[in-house]
Image (spheres, grey):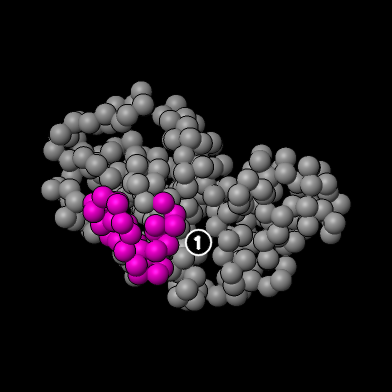
Amino acid sequence: MRESILLELRQSLLTRSPLPSLPESVWKRTGALNTWGTNAIEGNTLTWRDVEMVLLEQRSVGNRPILDVLETLHHETAFRGLVQRLDAPIRLQTVLELHETVFRGIHPDAGQWRRVSVRITGSRHSPPRAEKVVTAMASWEEEYAERDLAGESTFGLASWMHHRFESIHPFTDGNGRIGRLLLNLHFLKHSWPPVHVLPPHRNRYIHALESGHSEDLSELKAFLKTAMARSLLDLLDQVGTQEDELKPLGALEARGDHSTKYLGLRASQGELPAIKTSGKWHSSDRATRLYTQFVGR
């Protein structure tokens, strides 16, 4: 995904509204989508429809574990609270507060660094032993602040900070969810919208994190850019102009120089900003125009 395309899409979004000032209905849906995705890839049993009922319609759901419902409510609170954290630096206290918010009443060590050594399921990487967690996290905090102050690119720094956090694995449980909240706090602080990791993206996301253990963050960076494209398209579809309305690629073929098959190929390759819904790719007139402008064939 060309960053030049993302920058143009972001500018179109910010022209409509600063991120903290997006309509409440948009933030509610964004928070629900983010919460469903981040919990679902970790095994939470609530479906997207369940989350819609709980968070958007304020209705109860039956036959779901109470802890899964609590995770949903607590995570949405933490996610919505990110906007109130934009003026403060990301510190270790930020990390602990987010963990406590999401997991209070769920895990007995909510808001506490892990006191045992752990392994990451399915990974060859071994996180530091428990006694080294605080030192490793202090180094993470310091290096992030230094690299941010030095003006490192938003996506490059996002890839490093997220991968390093997950590599340290500072909590007994909940590292993925807190790491993704911190990732989105980083994006919001740099005037980019939050990204969502949904169940269909899980395998690529995990593979990108695993690739980072070989000191190659390019796959994770590419994943984050593709995820950002989806977020920008989704938000512009809600608050943008007619040019931002999401449409099936077949409807866009008639308006441009590319066939539906070609557009679908480029969407699957992560080059054309697009969202897959019910098995079909959707994009917008603006996104396909920007693709033609910056990439062509």
Choose between 29 and 236: the one closer to the eye. 29
Q: Is 168 placed above or below 111 here? A: above
Q: Is 89 placed above or below 219 here? A: below
Choose between 1 and 47: the one closer to the eye. 47
Give the percent coordinates (x, y) of residue 272: 69, 48
- Number of residues whose C-alpha sits closer than 10 Å to that of mark 1, classed few (under 14), some (14–19) or many (20 or more): many
Give the percent coordinates (x, y) of residue 219: 53, 36
Quadrant of residue 52 within the rendered picture: bottom left
Please count the marks in the image: 1
> Residue shown at 47%/44% (left/top)?
199
Choose between 229 and 201: the one closer to the eye. 201
Give the percent coordinates (x, y) of residue 33: 45, 58
> Residue shown at 35%/47% (left/top)?
45
Magenta-drawn stretch, dominant element (helix, strand or loop): helix
- 291 displayed left or right of 175: right
**Magenta stretch: includes residue 215:** no
- 92 displayed left or right of 278: left
- 71 displayed left or right of 265: left
The reply to whether residue 258 is visible in this rendering is yes
- Residue marked by disc 1: 193
Q: Secondary structure at mark 1?
A: loop
> Residue shown at 51%/42% (left/top)?
200
> Residue shown at 83%/48% (left/top)?
258
The reply to whether residue 34 is visible in this rendering is no
Quadrant of residue 6 within the rendered picture: bottom right
